[in-house]
Image: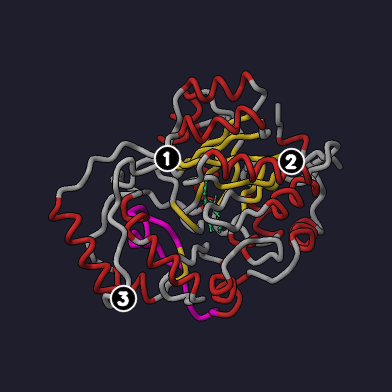
Amino acid sequence: MFNFSQLKYPLIQAPMAGGPNTAEMVSTVANAGAVGSYGFAYNNADKISQGLIAAKEKIDTQSVGALNANFFFFREVKAPNTDIIEAAVDSLRQVSDNSIEPTIPQAPYFPDLSAQLEPIWEHRPDILTFHFGIPDKAVIDKAHSLNMAVGITATCSDEAIEIENSGADFIVAQGIEAGGHRGIFSPANYDEALSCFDLIKVLSQVTRLPLVAAGGIMNGDHIRKALSLGATAVQMGTAFLTTNESGTPKAHRDYLLNQQDRTAVITHGFSGRPARGIDNRFIRKMKDKPVLPFPLQNTLTGRIRATAIANNDGEYQSLWAGSHFRECQQETVIDLIERLFKPLTTCNS
Ligand SMILES: Cc1cc2nc3c(=O)[nH]c(=O)nc-3n(C[C@H](O)[C@H](O)[C@H](O)COP(=O)(O)O)c2cc1C
């Protein structure tokens, strides 16, 4: 089964749902000796199969790196009443100046995890990870029976303890700086909002599972600090968004590289769950506006986001990014990994 000690570099290229994780990105990372990840969040079984087959074809069988498939753990959500839907639709119409009609979500509101996992059992990536919660024990047991390691995101000690008790193999400790969705199990819970380094310190006291530090890690100094605090590896998303191999939309890439005077803020506006992205007109206009619960708000905003991407308009799409996005560079995946680990000794040396 996968073990972090097999890696040349203690690095997971983060799963990033929505397109950044191309087969080129994932396989280049794995071939370099780190973990390449796909974020399959909303994908159906066919898309998941295609991604896994494409990456596996490119990954050298002798590689010490690994392939990770990541899923959202969606929670049951009740259909909101008509008034709540109307209020959320009205605010979105205002935000788009009535130019784009929101898509009203229809049940089922999210993909069926057991159907999504069918291609996983068939193609068997080395690692299976979950964001937003812990899957049924049967899923973790099945992964283990097929020799796959299981990792789950935690944002606080209570979540870490639950993860350890679930039988999972490692924890992705996600600090508040992280780009994209905050992995907190329930967004209704009080959020301690610990920084990545503080979270590693706190979690090392409550769990013996390997900790993967995530959130705002952009350079070799950040990696050394995370490892010195007790992390076994780091998980980095934002830094990979501007690599040549990433499927990041053009405007998103441009903002990451060239909008240095902006900050990355947390919004519920795009999906109904807290997520960090570069501040833009959509986020500002949605401040304090009613939103539907996750993932219904994601469906509702789908057309606005897709139109903005097609029009190369950075003001109405989610520009997910961590707090330290200003350190992004346009480079190849290999140049990024070499830059990150240049003065650092590798796992095997
Ligand atoms: C564009 C983007 C999409 C993301 N999508 C996912 C996802 O699908 N699953 C997941 O577990 N984490 C996701 N994350 C969070 C990352 O796993 C990780 O916690 C984060 O990137 C770390 O912070 P950093 O972006 O500052 O490196 C995403 C992050 C970004 C930037």
Amino acid type of the residue tagged 2 in the rendering: Lys
In the rendered image, the vertical position of residue 109 relative to residue 275, given as above or below: above
Identify the secondary structure beneath mark 2: helix
Q: CA distance from mark 3 to mark 1?
A: 29 Å
Direction from residue 299 to residue 24 in the image, left or right: right
The three-letter amino acid code for the residue at tag 1 is Pro
Q: Earlier in the sequence, mark 3 or mark 2?
A: 2
Q: Residue at x 17, y 61 (%)?
A: 87
Which of the two residues, 268 or 214, is positioned nearer the viewer here? 268
| Local secondary structure at mark 3 | loop
Name the one closer to the observer, 74 or 133.
Answer: 74
Amino acid at circle 3 = Ser
Residue 267 location (% of width, % of height): 36, 62
Residue bearing mark 3: 99
Q: Quadrant of the C terminus?
A: top right
Residue designated by label 1: 111
The question of residue 6 being in magenta is answered with: no
Asked whether mark 3 and ligand 1 are closer than 8 Å, the reply comes as: no
Q: CA distance from mark 3 to mark 2?
A: 42 Å
Is residue 270 highlighted in magenta?
A: yes
Q: Marks 2 and 1, Cα distance to the nearest angstrom?
A: 24 Å
Q: Earlier in the sequence, mark 2 or mark 1?
A: 2
Q: Residues within 10 Å of mark 3 (few under 14, many from 20)?
A: few
Q: Is residue 244 above or below residue 133?
A: below
Q: Residue at x 64, y 67 (%)?
A: 242
Magenta highlight: main SS: loop
Which residue is the site of mark 2? 56
The part of the chain drawn in magenta is 259-276
Which element is circle 1 on?
A: loop
Asked if one can make out residue 87 in the rendered structure from this viewpoint, the answer is yes
